[in-house]
Image: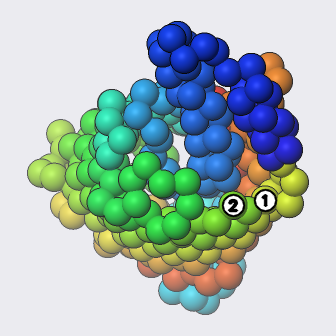
Amino acid sequence: MVWVCGFGAAASVDEPPASDQATRERMEKLFKMSVEELAHTEIVPLNVLGSHTHFQGEWMVGYNFMFMDMRGNLDGTRDVSVSEVLQKYPVAHTAMSMQMHMFELMYAPTERLTLMAMGQYKLNSMDHQTTNASFTARSEGFGDSSVMALYQLLGYGRRYGNQLFLNAGLSLPTGAIDAEDLGSLLEYSLQLGSGTFDLLPGLTYVGQTEDLVWGAQARGTIRLGENDHEYRLGNAYRINLWSSYRVTDWFGPSVRLDWQQWGNVAGADPALDPLKNPAFDANKQSGRRLDALIGLNFYADRGFLKGHRLSLEAGIPVYQYIAGPNLKADWMATISWSYVFR
């Protein structure tokens, strides 16, 4: 912050003549932008979707790489062995990896309103086991896209204090629901999209001092209608609690708790036989999970990298319930980059 204060002092010494009102206003606006970017944009979390707004006229581009490893089966909260699954089904799952590349674009046309658009590319891989063989099925392609508006209800334009804003979004069915591998239609969890338009409501609270930020967000995914395969995925709900502390002008660690809950599939894809594979069963797709995550956040407050930010976050489930037998999460990690500019 010393550099900013130094900039402010220099600006007061070299202040333009009173007659040059336009130059003075431009300098004051530039100084104000610099303070806002340092105090607001750098310390807010990157890994919670729709968790921050921007000042009027700001743009943000962002990229997130998310990875989850799933290993072993649960039936409720009980671990189930592969041999036990194979006593009831011809096929058991042993492991799955999920990768997602997410691209974000944000713009604030007013102090209260920030608009957001997101697209994603997915790569999924699931290992299967039968009584005498093993094989891996894969899916890859673009997932569903979404648009969102974040409207600030409380604290707009403030550097510090309490902020509350409304999330209102819509998910667009741009991801495939007919992905196949080895000549067969893949499980619900390996499909790339929902096949339906989905509402994305939410409410986010953020509290902030100069070096500390804390927040909470409740968000839902409400499925609308039925897709072309005669089903719709279950509604999903998510609650995030987080805190981040600025240790230096360029680094701050963070902690986060992430609660997720999702329902069973309504209807069923007629091409998936629930007696052959538990992941084909529409009534065994629900679950809930609590993840604990730790993050490292790096931000540039000056120089040619000013406005760039990099975050690394990883965590494990501390509780999970799976309608099964189906795969459970083992660990997850995210790498996020963003750049804010005007």
Q: In which quarter of the image is residue 64?
A: top right
Q: Which one is in front, 39 or 50?
A: 39
Q: Which one is in front, 273 or 175?
A: 175
Give the residue at x 74% y 20%.
Answer: 14
**Which is in the foreground here, disc 2 or disc 1?**
2
User: Residue 136's x, y, as percent?
Assistant: 65, 44
User: Residue 1's x, y, as percent?
Assistant: 80, 46
Disc 2 versus disc 1: distance between alpha carbons? 8 Å
User: Residue 126's x, y, as percent?
Assistant: 62, 49
Residue labelled with disc 2? 210
Q: Can residue 142 be seen in this view?
A: no
Up the image or down, 322 lies above or below 199; here it is below
Please, what secondary structure does the residue beneath circle 1 have?
loop
Give the residue at x 61% y 54%.
Answer: 45
Up the image or down, 257 lies above or below 42; here it is below
Q: Can residue 68 be seen in this view?
A: yes
**Which label sits on residue 174?**
none
Give the residue at x 26% y 44%.
Answer: 170
Residue labelled with disc 1? 246
Quick one: label 2, few (<14), some, or many (20+) residues within 10 Å?
A: some
Up the image or down, 57 lies above or below 265; here it is above
Give the residue at x 58% y 33%.
Answer: 33
Mark sitting earlier along the chain (2/1): 2
Q: Which one is in front, 94 or 218?
A: 218
Q: Which amino acid does label 1 sit on?
A: Arg
Q: In which quarter of the image is residue 83?
A: bottom right
Please, what secondary structure does the residue beneath circle 2 have?
loop
User: Residue 144's x, y, as percent?
Assistant: 37, 37
Q: Which amino acid does label 2 sit on?
A: Glu
Report whether 138 appears left or right of 197. Answer: right
Tags 2 and 1 touching, CB below 8 Å: yes
